[in-house]
Structures are given as structure tokens and as C-alpha cells.
Amino acid sequence: MQRRDFLKNLAALGTACTLARPDRNLTAGAWAAPAKNSRPKILLRSSWQTVNIGDIAHTPGVLHLLEQHYPEAEVGLWPSSVKDGVHELLMARFPQLKIVQSRDDVSAALTEYDFLLHGSGPSIVGVKEIDRWVNETQKPYGIFGVTLGTFDEATLKRVNNARFTYFRDPVSLDRARANGATCPIMDFGPDGAFAVDLANKPAADAFLATQELTPGEFVCCIPRLRYTPYWLIKNQPFDEKKHARNESMAEHDHAPLRDAITQVVRQTKAKVLLCPEDRSQMKVGKELIFDKLPEDVRPRIVWRENYWLTDEALSVYRQSLGLFGLEMHSPIMCIGNGIPALVGRFEEQTSKGTMWNAIGLKDWLFDFDQPAQLARLSETVVSLVKDPQAAQEKAAQARKLVAARQQAMVEQLKTTVASST
């Protein structure tokens, strides 16, 4: 018997057995609640893409939270992509994880799992999967830590029909309320990537040794264009309008980073590591920062020319004094691990950066479209390097707040699933 036919028969048998069980008490339109003596089964919809270590980080972060606070649950992952070494990365950290990818596996999962949990992201990314889950199973779902920039009728319906919706930034939460969202539980819920605990210390140590970077004596910097040039790193068509905007703002956005780097080198003994969060940023760091630095500064700058995965990157961040730049998820991962991190943002990004206000890090958020905020960037970076203890204490307070919020999110998930049995 072919594997596909076997899985179809197995799924059909499981459905038949489920419908025959007296403890289910199914009625028309009711979802099949888990048996009281079985483990609750949570299907996590996540893993949006692999060209960005932040998008990779969403999944292991939420998996870690469930492992910590809901160990009795059996968790499956319904991903968009776990290519490029991400499958191996996840299985090394979560060896019991079941990854649901094939058409037959997904069909079986719709029957097998009790609750769909949409993971963190820049929006409700898995809209099609939520709709399929609802239409085919009538089982409940919830949303963990998303940003929502717009509220059309379809989005509002998905928020309202969720058992809970957590927004990863306060602007999204306020927007939901202003647009009449009626989801029974809506609150600020930090991005899942805060909880990432991945590590690849051997790779990190080898990189630091090769580049002559001493733990505790360097700071990390991440560049970014206004729009990610996906046409260079994914199979997407060239966007002339976005490219033109990138070109017009490139110097405006990276000159402040160069100044901060220059001040760090001239006022302290620290080195600076230019590193990427996505596959396009090695080139950006080289052309817009490294090549334009003063001659006296460049010898203490390390430019990473290759992309890396989340585990190695985080292991390097853990050994740094901190991080600054124009990306969001490397700072998120840093704060989640007690590492100081400053965030630069601009109009083209979503409101996600405002989460720094919600976790007590307002002074570490810089709007690059506001000259007054740009003016204090360099001195703040230098202060982080000169007084690492104060910076670490501030990061620790934010980490504590995030951890408490995320535990409450999982507790709500547990309550919701339990109330449905």
C-alpha cells in the first residue's frame, strides 16, 4: 500500500472512531472536543519564511512557551516553509515536534488536533488556513502576537471569531478596538520571538575567534533598506517604486548608524559587528556602512559577509554588549535573552516597533523620520557600551515584563482549551 493511501485510510478510520465515541456528544455544527483523558492537541500555524532569522524565530519562540507553560499539550506545526536548514534546526531543539506539511498530513491534522493557534507575524498571515480550519472542522482558534495595519471586513471577522487575539504592539490593539472588534479577549501579547532559546555556540565561537571578536567587547549593528528587496532574495518580480524609495532614503537612514559606529570606536575600546537579519543585508552593510566609514574607524569593524540561521546569530548576540540598527526581531530576541537592544524604525515599517514603548524601552526606540530622535541615537549607543551594567539591568526588566505577559497568554490558551472539553 502506498504511504498516501495508508494515511488517507488512517485518517478515515480515525474520523469513524471519533464519531463513534460516546464521550464526544456531537451535534450538528459542534466541534469534536478532546476526550478528558487525552492530551490536548494544539496545531501551531507559523513558520512564514526562511530568508529572515526573525521570521524563523517566531516558531521556536512559541514552541518554547508551550513547552514551558503547557507541557501536557501535544503540539504540531503547520508551516509555510521550513527549508534551508530550518527543519533540522527545529527538530534538534524540539525532537518530539510533528511537522504537518503534506496534503495528507494536513487533512489528517484537521481531524486530529483540537485547537488552531496562529503564531506571531506581521499580520494574520495564515488567513487561508484559519478559514479552512473553521469551514472544515468548526473547531476553535486563537491568535498570538500579531500586528494589524488595516482592518477590512474579512480581517475583522477573523479577529472576532477567534477565542482570543493578542496584538504584539499597542497601536494594533488600539486600531482593533477603534474598528469595532468584538473578540472576547483582546490584549497586548508580545511577539513569540522573545521566547527563543536556540543556541549554536560552537558555530558562534568559531566565528568570533576567526574575526577576533572577544565576548563582552563588541556591539552588533544591523542595517536595513526601507523595503526588503525580495526581488533579490526570493522569486519575486522587481518593484521599481520600492527600489526607488530605498535608493532615495539609503543615505538618510544609514548615516546615523555610521555616526554611532564611529563614536563607539573613538570613545570606547569596543569593536562593532555588522551583521544581517535577512539575506539582503550583507550587501547593504558593506556598501552603505563599512565602505563609507572613516579610515581610522574601519579596522575595528567586522563585516559578516554570509547569512546565518537564528541559533548561531543568537549565540553571537548573547556574547555581545548589545545591538542596535534598523531591524526588529534581532532586538526582540536580544531582549528575550537579557541583551540590551535599540530599535530604529521608519514610516514604511508596520507599527510593530511601538512594542518597545509597551515593555518599558521607550528610550531605546528611535523613529528615523523624526530628526530629534535621530539626534540622540549615537549618544545612546555609546552609553550602552560605556555602562553595560545599567543597560543589562534595563534589558532584564523588559525581559521580565515580557515573560509575565507571555505566560498569561499561554494560561489563557489552556483555559480556552479546557473550557471547550
Image (spheres, helix red, strand yellow):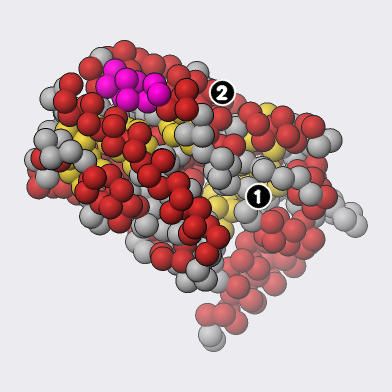
Q: Position of residue 54 (x, y in %)?
A: 43, 46
Residue identifier under label 1: 124
Q: Is residue 335 left or right of residue 135?
A: left
Q: Position of residue 349 (x, y in %)?
A: 54, 43
Q: For mark 1, does the 10 Å Cα neighbourhood hold few (<14), some (14 to 19), or many (20 or more) residues?
A: many
Magenta segment boundaries in residue numbering: 375-383
Question: Does the magenta-highlighted stretch encompass residue 379?
Answer: yes
Q: Residue at x 39, y 21 (%)?
A: 376
Instruction: Answer above or below: position of 253 versus 137.
Output: above
Q: For mark 2, does the 10 Å Cα neighbourhood hold few (<14), some (14 to 19), or many (20 or more) residues?
A: some
Q: Position of residue 278 (x, y in %)?
A: 38, 53
Q: Residue at x 72, y 30 (%)?
A: 174
Going from N to C along the chain, the mark reached first, 2 or 1, is 1
Q: Position of residue 364 (x, y in %)?
A: 43, 23
Q: Hey, which quadrant is residue 27 in on the image?
A: bottom right
Helix, strand or loop at label 1? It is loop
User: Which of the numbered marks, if any, corresponds to residue 358?
Assistant: 2
Q: Is residue 65 left or right of residue 318?
A: right
Q: Residue furthest right?
A: 28
Q: Residue at x 83, y 50 (%)?
A: 153
Q: Is residue 34 left or right of residue 91?
A: right
- Give the amino acid at mark 1: Ile
Question: Does the magenta-highlighted stretch encompass residue 232?
Answer: no
- Give the amino acid at mark 2: Ala
Image quadrant holding the N terminus, namely: bottom right
